[in-house]
Amino acid sequence: MILMIETTALNCSVALCDNGNTIDCLEVRDDKFAHAEKLHPFIEELLAKNKLSANSLKAVAVSMGPGSYTGLRIGVSAAKGFAFALGIPMIAVSTLQMMTDFVKESHQANVFLPMIDARRMEVYTQRFDEIGLATNAIEARIIEPDFFQEKENKILVFGDGADKCLEMMPSNYSIVSGIYPSAVMMAKLSQKAFSDGDFVDAAYFEPFYLKDFVAGAPSTKNKLA
C-alpha cells in the first residue's frame, strides 16, 4: 500500500494506492490554502476509514511540483516524516506528467499542455507528445499571443492555469476544464516507481519549485506614523 500526497496547488489531496490502483481518496479545494490544517487529519482519516495502520504502508509518494512554494513544502515535509518514522521509501512524482497521463486516458491529441497557475499571466508548463512523453523541460511561461506557435497540431490545454489562454488560443488549441492536480492521478506513476525501486533520498530531496520563493514586503498599513 502506497500513501500518495498532493499539495502543489489549491487541492489538499491524499490517496491510497494498491497495485497501481487508487482505492480511496480524501481532498478539498480551498482558495485559502488549508493544506497545513487539513493534510495530517486527512491522512489519519483515510487510514482509519480503510482500517489500515501507518505500519501497513510500503512507501509514501509525493507530488513534486512545480507549484505553490508553501504547498510543496507542506506536502514534502509530511512525506519525509512518514518515510523517516516508518522506515519506508519515498517516491517523487512529476505533477505535470501525472496530469498529462490522467487526461490522456480520456482524450486524444497531438500535444498535451498541462498548466499550473503561477499567478498573474504566468504558468508552469511542459509540452508532452501524443503518447505522453515530455518533449521539453518544465518552464515558467507568460501567456501572451506568441506562446501559441503551433498552427497545425491538435493541442489540449488543461490545469488551473489553462483559463488564461481562453482569449488568445488559435482554433487548433482547446481546453479540457476541471483538471487540477490530485492524488488520484498519482497511482500508476507511484506504483511504477515502487516496482522499479525509483526512490528519492528523503534526507536531501527538495521539491521542484522552478522559481525562488519571494516574500512580499511587510505591510505598513497599520503602522503608526
Image (tube, rainbow, N blue to C red):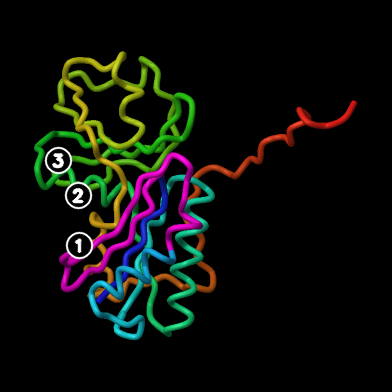
Q: Position of residue 125 (x, y in %)?
A: 36, 37
Say whether residue 19 is magenta: yes
Q: Are marks 2 and 3 in contact (CB under 8 Å)?
A: no
Closer-to-camera residue (140/163): 163
The residue labelled by disc 3 is 130
Query: Could you tell me how far apart the alpha carbons at marks 2 and 3 are, in whole angstroms?
Result: 11 Å
The label number, if any, that marks residue 188 in the structure image: 1
Residue under the point 44% across and 66% down: 40
Residue under the point 47% across and 50% down: 34
Q: Circle 1 sits in a helix, a strand or a loop, which is it?
A: helix
Residue under the point 38% across and 81% down: 88
**Quarter that holds the C terminus:** top right
Closer-to-camera residue (98/39): 39
Which range of residues does the magenta coloring cover?
10-39
Amino acid residing under circle 1:
Lys
The residue labelled by disc 2 is 101
